[in-house]
Amino acid sequence: MSHSATTEPRRARRAAPDGGRRTPRRRRRWGRIVLLSLVVLLLAVGGTGYWLYSSLNGNIDGVDLDKALGDDRPEKLPTSGQNLLVLGSDSRSGDNASLGTGKVSGARSDTALVVHIPEGRKQAVAVSIPRDTLVTRPECTKSDGSALPEAKRVMFNSVYSLAGPACVVKTVEKMSGVRMDHYMEIDFAGFKGLVDAIGGVPVTIDEPIKDTSSGLDLSAGTHTLDGTEALAFVRTRHGVGDGSDLGRIGLQQQFLIALLSEVKKQDLFGSPTKTYKIADTLTAALTTDSDLASLTSLADFARSMNGVDPATMETIMLPVAYDKIDPNRVVAAEPQAGDLWKAVRSDSEIPESAKKSPATGG
C-alpha cells in the first residue's frame, strides 16, 4: 500500500517531539534491535516460499521518495553498494500504548541509522545520528501540503514530527552528501511482536537488574524474556552499571546475540506458520520507501543481502561535539564527520580517525 510523502500517515504514532534534553550517550536506545528485526524480516520473506506471504503486502506503508524529493539529490554510489536510512519510531500511541514505554504522546524518530552496505555485500556499517544533533533542515513539504521553510540549528529529532519521513531523508542527504537508496522504519510494537512470535529469548545475567523506570526486575541467572520484558531489558539504564547509557548498550549487544542465536536455533525456514506470524507482526509495524513496499521487493532485497552477517555489523556514532551555545545539544564534529561521510560516498573503508567523537572522548 503506497502513500506519497504528503499523505497523512495511517498510524497515530507520528506526532510532535517531546523537546527533552539528552546527552549524546543516549543515542541508539534500540538501534541495534531495529536493525536485527529488519534483517530477520528480510530473511523471513526472502526465503523459499515467500509467495505465501503475498497477503501481507497491505500491511506495509510506502513513502514515495522520488516524488517527494525530486531530482535535487546526491549522486548514487559509484559502485553496487547501497545506503539505507533506518528509523526507530518511539511511539507511545496506537499498538504501542500498552508497551510500558512512557506516557509521551505521539512519535519521534529517536533512533536514526544510516546503514551502508558496501559493494560485495559482506560487512555492513551503521552510522547512528544522535537525536539531539543540531542540523540545517532544508525546505520540505509538510503532510498537509504546505511548505516548511529551511531552518538552521534545529534538533534532528524534530524533523520527523514536523514534516514526516521524506523530510528526514532530505535532511540526512543534505548534511551528509550521501544518497539514501532506501528507507525503513519500525516501531516498538514490531520489536515486541518479534520476541513474542518466536516464544521468547533466553538471556543470562551475572547480577540482578531492578529498574523502577522500565519495570524490569530480574534476579541473577538465566531468564527467557517475553516481548514486554525484552523491551524493558534493552531500554533499561538505571538498573545496570553506573546508570549511564554504556550499560544499556552492553545489554543491547547481549540481547542481539541471544536473539540471533534463538532465531537460528528455531530454523524459521522450516516453520512457515511461525515465519508468517513474524512477518505479519513486523510488516504491520513497517514503513518503507515505495520501491520496497511489497513482499516481492523485500524478498529481492533480502537475497541481495545474503552475504551480510548482522552479527558482524559495525555501529558507529556520527562524530559530534557539544554545541558552544547550547551544551545540551551537539553538532557534527569536523573534520571527523566529513571524513566519515566521504568514505561512505566513495564506498570505501571508514578510517579510524573518522570514528572518534569529541563529545564522548572516543
Image: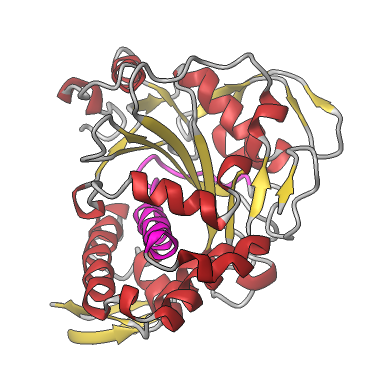
Q: Is 246 within the magenta?
A: no
Q: As rendered, which of 188 and 298 lies closer to the eye?
A: 298
- Name the image quarter holding residue 136: top right
Above or below 227: residue 106 = above
Q: Is 31 within the magenta?
A: yes
Above or below 288: residue 211 = below
Q: What residue do we see at 33% from left, 73% from top?
A: 269
Percent across and percent down for residue 312 are 18, 49
In the rendered view, does 358 fall on the left or right side of 185? Answer: left
The extreme left residue here reads 206
The magenta segment: 19-47
Colour convention of the picture: secondary structure
Q: How many marks?
A: 0
Q: What residue do we see at 35% from left, 83% from top?
A: 200
Q: What residue do we see at 49% from left, 29% from top?
A: 180
Percent across and percent down for residue 333 are 35, 20
In the rendered view, does 263 fall on the left or right side of 178? Answer: left
Q: Which quarter of the rendering shows the C terminus? A: top left
Look at the image and tell me whether residue 95 can be seen.
Answer: yes
Q: What residue do we see at 31% from left, 71% from top?
A: 239
Percent across and percent down for residue 335 are 30, 12
Above or below 235: residue 9 = above
Q: As rendered, which of 250 and 237 lies closer to the eye?
A: 250
Look at the image and tell me whether residue 196 can be seen.
Answer: no
In the rendered view, does 157 fall on the left or right side of 116? Answer: right
In the rendered view, does 149 fall on the left or right side of 55? Answer: right
Q: Which quarter of the rendering shows the N terminus? A: bottom right
Percent across and percent down for residue 7 are 80, 44
